Amino acid sequence: MTVSRKQVHLAAHFPGVNNTTVWSDPRSGSQIDFESFRHLARTAERGRFDFFFLAEGLRLRELKGRIHDLDVVGRPESLTVLAALSAVTERLGLAGTINVTFNEPYELARRLASLDHLSGGRAAWNVVTTSDAFTGENFRRGGYLDPADRYLRAAEFVELARELWDSWRPDALAADQEGGRFVRHGGIGDVRHRGPQFDVEGRFTLPRSPQGHPVIIQAGDSDEGREFAAATADVIFSRHGTLEEGRAFYADVKRRLAGYGRAPDSLKIMPGVTYALGDTEEEAAENAAEIRRQQVSPQTAIAFLEQVWGRDMSGYDTDGPLPDVDPVVGGGLSQGRVPVKDPLAVAAKWRALAAEKKLSIRELVIEVTGRQSFIGTPQSVAARIDEFVTTDAADGFILVPHLTPGGLDDFVAKVVPILQERGVFRTEYTGTTLRDHLGLETPGRTS
Amino acid sequence: MTALHLAVALDGAGWHPAAWREPTARPGDLFTAAHWAKLVGEAERGLLDFVTLEDALSLQSSRQDGPDDRLDQVRGRFDAVLLAAALAPLTSRIGLVPTATTTHTEPFHVAMGIATLDHVSGGRAGWRAQISPRPSEARHFGRREFPGPAPGPLDDLLAEAGDAVEVARRLWDSWEDDAEIRDVATGRFIDRDKLHYIDFDGRWFGVKGPSITPRPPQGQPPVTVLAHERAPYELAARVADVVYVTPHDAGQARAVVEEIRGIPREGTPLKIFADVLVFLDGEPGRAAARKARLDELDRAELVSDAAVFTGTPDELAELLLDWQRAGIEGFRLRPGAVPHDLKAITRGVVPALCRRGAFRREYEAATLRGLLGLPHPANRHAKVTTS
Ligand SMILES: Cc1cc2nc3c(=O)[nH]c(=O)nc-3n(C[C@H](O)[C@H](O)[C@H](O)COP(=O)(O)O)c2cc1C
């Protein structure tokens, strides 16, 4: 018997609304036409990916009090587009990012269960939290949520969703025409939840869905976030895309699992990564550099500076040196993104780097923001992915292409076959649900 | 003769509580996408304007105050917006009009959902806006942090629904059609002067905007409302494109039309549809017998807010034309049992209307607004150009 190698999991991130997504390229298509979603999802399914992934942002981002106009803007309501994709794909998992602050458990649990039924067991939910009052201005709730309560609400939200998903017995649906029993006696349970965050009482409106519970993904990095993932999630979407950081994060989170009586492989860690390919290493490096230039236009370089410096920088020449003025701490120019934590330290680091490498503003921004995680030939990129996974820096990756909708075409055509030859990636789907693809157990009923 | 509009309301195995026990019903398939795809495919082959999909934020019940323990009726429903979205790629011309409630939901999410449905269907989305007045629904939303009207007086719920539709309409217009510019020279993807805050500040919620989703292909997907009395008629006249009413004969139809036409309204006239619950068989007497058999199975006579019709497709066609003369412009037929009564509509009633010159022989428009004869609406923010 051959020893089977640790398998790679892959997901396709639909290009988002930040500067990773290149819109100035002639090959760049619509960010909203259904055809773009269909194209990327079908490409991922052809590549036998585990799932397709959508991020979420519930308010258009702003800089200097105005809507940020340099990046792609506009996206669909996640679950609605995923439901449509369920009709044009057969096996691919369908993951949506949905905020727990601006939703209610009963309604969201039933939307997710609906997607799980409609897709035959392929739904996943990336549970994100936010307390930001800026986004809250679009919602009834407003921005009242104390940041300290974010994960308390998230944990109780998911717990309640699970009570609802479990509330119909697996055999509740009798559909017995002769005997006149649509529902079996005792098949639909009463849910009574009383907690610090929610009071919910009643019956759920859907039978238990094919996966029992949709797959739960978590993306958040604080200690509370990691603890929440260890307690609750099936997958972590992380930002730790280097070998060293990846291993440290992986070890940290997997260690926490034991405290919840969970096995290490019941939680998959999938960093979000970007890549650039070429027929030779040099060509790949050139392609990578060209993509970075497209991602950081002069105007985008200024916008990055302004986020750190907290003041208007539009007068600076992006081919010239970094400004010698200091950042305004708490300038708060940017809304709708994670704020820069220590602007003075960041500015000092950037200045040192620019001086050492003789970089202009634009070159510096290109250097310090979002360099591709994997650059190389299909061979070397596949080897690198394999290395990350075998050495426990990750269980797989969420690939973030820079082009809509064809951004994964080359990866699927060139890298996937090599991963398959190496014996670390499936050549066919062996199961029908996303839990099958990820090797996760179908949850038992908790009650 | 002006052509009629024809829609079908889909819910469970049909509108009779015992419909799932009909030999052709497939009750075990109700929670699969394939089952619904077949039904909507049939409606599309019949060239219907649209289907509506029922929904609620609680389990079906024979009681007003909470769940019942009946085991002999269909229980369970999909989220209708998601069901409609799953049907969109499988159909190409028919309108998809899911029910979404305005009472406990976030107006922003609902508006994005309908806009997205419009994008994925290429301009075939509509919305049946509904209130959720039941205490059992309120108990599913244990909100303690901020006030809400539910379960409150009906007038408040209707006013809140009006606000929710107003918010959706403003959000759908918050991106002008030519907002996306992709201007490489200035590095700008979007012309932010063509994105607009909506700054809605109402009694129950405020919404800042703009939308996160670009303007839907139809501009304004049609909003529809079911109404049985004066207050919801007024709501419909104020915010909807289509109202469904429930007269029981031509005289009542005339009276309802008169009452609604008397309510002041701006813009395109409200389209008035009548709901009729139908049992149809080609052979005279057979539909009535079938309904009686279903009543017996359910151990009760069917009760309905809408008129209940039993008869042949030809007889129904005559009734529809009679009500059309009373001012009704379209019908939302609620099939007593599917697929049986749905097929009787598409293969019996539709041809009967065609023979009378009262229904389309092919789809004449690619969008739901087009099928309803509603013009593509200009964006409220668009500058009128005089060139
Ligand atoms: C890789 C990654 C992706 C994320 N994607 C989203 C997103 O699409 N939408 C969103 O609202 N928040 C997103 N978040 C934000 C997190 O949910 C969370 O609010 C943030 O990371 C702060 O949580 P923390 O304090 O635990 O790190 C993402 C976070 C990470 C790490």
Image (cartoon, coloured by chain):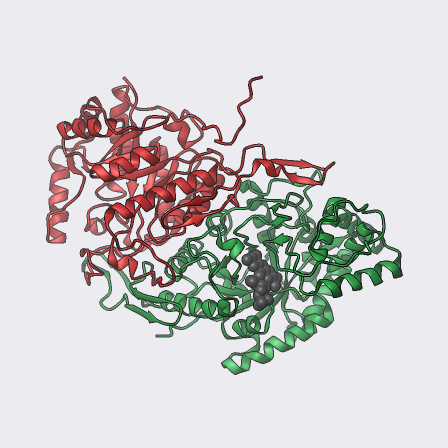
Q: Is residue A163 left or right of residue A1?
A: left
Residue at image position (75%, 56%) is: A378
Q: Quadrant of residue A443?
A: bottom left
Between B37 and B51, the residue placed more toward the observer is B51
| Quarter of the image that includes the C terminus of chain B | top right
User: Can residue A96 be spotted in the picture?
Assistant: no
Residue at image position (26%, 21%) is: B355
Between A156 and A112, the residue placed more toward the observer is A156
Residue B272: x percent and y percent?
27, 30
Task: Say above or below: A261 vs B78.
Answer: below
Q: Quadrant of residue A244?
A: bottom right
Quadrant containing ligand 1 reads: bottom right
Between B74 and B387, the residue placed more toward the observer is B387
| Quarter of the image that includes the N terminus of chain B | top left
Residue A111: x percent and y percent?
41, 55
Task: Say above or below: B353 vs A405.
Answer: above
Q: Is residue B10 left or right of residue A298?
A: left
Q: Is residue B205 left or right of residue A133?
A: left
Residue A422: x percent and y percent?
70, 65
Task: Say above or below: A403 vs B280.
Answer: below
- For the image, the number of numbered tags is 0
Residue B307: x percent and y percent?
16, 37
Residue at image position (59%, 70%) is: A222
Q: What is the display colour for chain B?
A: red
Q: What is the display colour for chain A?
A: green
